[in-house]
Image (cartoon, grey):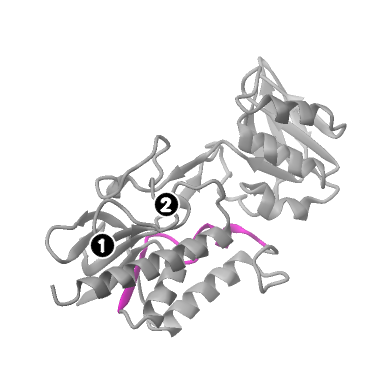
Amino acid sequence: MIYDILIIGGGPAGLTAATYGCRAGKSVLVLEKETFGGQITWSPKVENFPGFVSISGAELGDRFMEQAMEQGAEVELEEAVSVNTEGDVKTVTCASGAEFQGRSLIIAAGAKPRMLGLPREAELVGSGVCFCAVCDGAFYKDKTVAVNGGGNSALQDALLLSEKCGKVYLIHRRDSFRGEAKLVEALKQRENVEFVMNSRITALLGREELSSIVVKTGEESREIALEGLFVAIGHAPDLGAFGSLIELDGGGYAASGEDCLTKTPGVFVAGDCRKKSVRQLTTAVSDGSAAALAACAWLDSTEGR
């Protein structure tokens, strides 16, 4: 079968695109390599998405998928590894060897937060290990947390958390920050923020939830008791297999605007893999709707050619 729209990525952007595409009368297939719902499924609670006072990330991800399927979208748990755009039909080849074809393609592959690479880190995601202070900071009101990183994102996270948390440790592997000096000065004024410089985290401790970390400074190590660790060392867009279809910026993100267009006719990009200043659940679903509507308009304009 040749679908009207193929979507690579089953997170909020991809599933929103699927819903909009189906409602426009197009046939849609969504390919997802890991978990439908995307990274939001890691969050134990989501309290900043309109329409829900509080909902688990897993349940919200399920609702995205259920809505898309209710509208007629098909889904496959497959990892897309290459795309052939020659001719009028795009062919996506998956790691399993399966091939799927579509007249248009939306790449919503997402961007994953870079991890520290420590034992049990993945296991403790959502149980003390976090990547988004805006999303999860409120759950640590009056508690002790740490932020790991030295760029603007880490500094902004630490500032935000210092307004809610009882204590914030800001841990950086160098003796100075890469981020803006004004942010550093603002943090120095916060009595509940402690800088831990020239240091790195070497271990995460706790059974079912994070209870402390081990930090090494020079040859000395110490254990810091806390409830939350916010890792802010950047994100990595998941566009390796599709770089030839779209223009990338210096960070590897798709250099597409709000219209979600790419340099390849009939190929669109949406979600966290797109260059943008804000990466939130709401901006992902916004991209998904924009990309789907752009794909539908492109399909309608090429009918009969």
- Rendered position, 40 above or below 175: below
Q: Position of residue 191 (x, y in %)?
A: 87, 31
Q: Quadrant of the C terminus?
A: bottom left
| 31 left or right, relative to 197 | left
| Disc 1 element | loop
Q: Residues within 10 Å of mark 1 (few under 14, many from 20)?
A: many
- The magenta-colored residue range is 27-44
Q: Nearer the viewer, mark 2 or mark 1?
A: 2
> Measuring 58% from the left and 44% from the top, which residue is drawn there?
121
Queried whether the magenta region covers residue 289, the answer comes back as no
- The tag on residue 257 is 2
Q: CA distance from mark 2 to mark 1?
A: 15 Å
Q: In this rendering, does residue 127 appear at all? A: no
Q: Position of residue 21 (x, y in %)?
A: 37, 75
Report which quarter residue 157 is drawn in.
top right
Q: Position of residue 133 (x, y in %)?
A: 68, 48
Q: Position of residue 212 (x, y in %)?
A: 74, 39
Nearer to me, 226 or 289: 289
